[in-house]
Image (tube, rainbow, N blue to C red):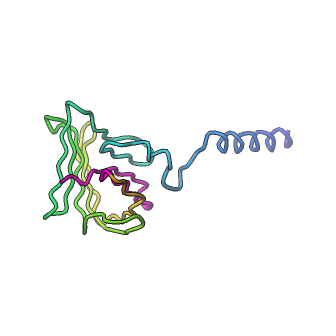
Amino acid sequence: MRNNCILGTLLFAALLLMTGCNRDGFDKTDFEILEPCLKVKGVVTYAYVSGSSQMALNRGRKEFRAGSDTMSDYFLLKMSELPREDGQILTGTLQWTTADDIVTRNSLTFKVEHIDGGGTVWLWCEAQRITVVIKLLN
């Protein structure tokens, strides 16, 4: 019986390793996301849809927002400063919609994981396991 428990535990651990489970850090597959997106604990809570979504960057207020045309679904990120380089640490307030509520998280710390040549920025908040993808629009 004990050997079956050990074997089961080992098989479960191997399965987690084979599926590429990454619950403790920024998921490198997030670099495949090229449009604004918000993921909370690995679950996409907002994804930009071309043709039925809008995005805006207010450089003066250091705010980025993306949402549906009706703004029934959106996220808003207010940053302490605009992202300018990989590895930069910034703080911010994040607000987003759920099916029946508006969620706000204050005083989040984000690491700029990467900024590409087109102005797409990948941000990671380790404490809350939040990935945010924004665009540095002109």
Q: Position of residue 69 (x, y in %)?
A: 15, 35
Name the foreground residue: 77 vs 33.
33
Residue 132 shown in magenta = yes
Q: Position of residue 41 (x, y in %)?
A: 44, 48
Residue 97 shown in magenta = no
Does residue 56 appear to the left or right of 9 in the view shown? left
Q: Position of residue 73 (x, y in %)?
A: 22, 38
Q: Write the residue at 13% across / 35% down.
A: 70
Q: Position of residue 24 (x, y in %)?
A: 53, 55
Q: Which residues are magenta?
A: 118-138
| Quarter where residue 63 is shown | bottom left
Q: Write the residue at 38% across / 62% down.
A: 112
- Looking at the image, how many numbered discs can be counted on the residues? 0
Q: Work out which residue is located at the far front of the displayed protein and give it.
A: 117
Depicted 16 relative to depicted 119: above or below: above
Depicted 132 relative to depicted 100: above or below: below
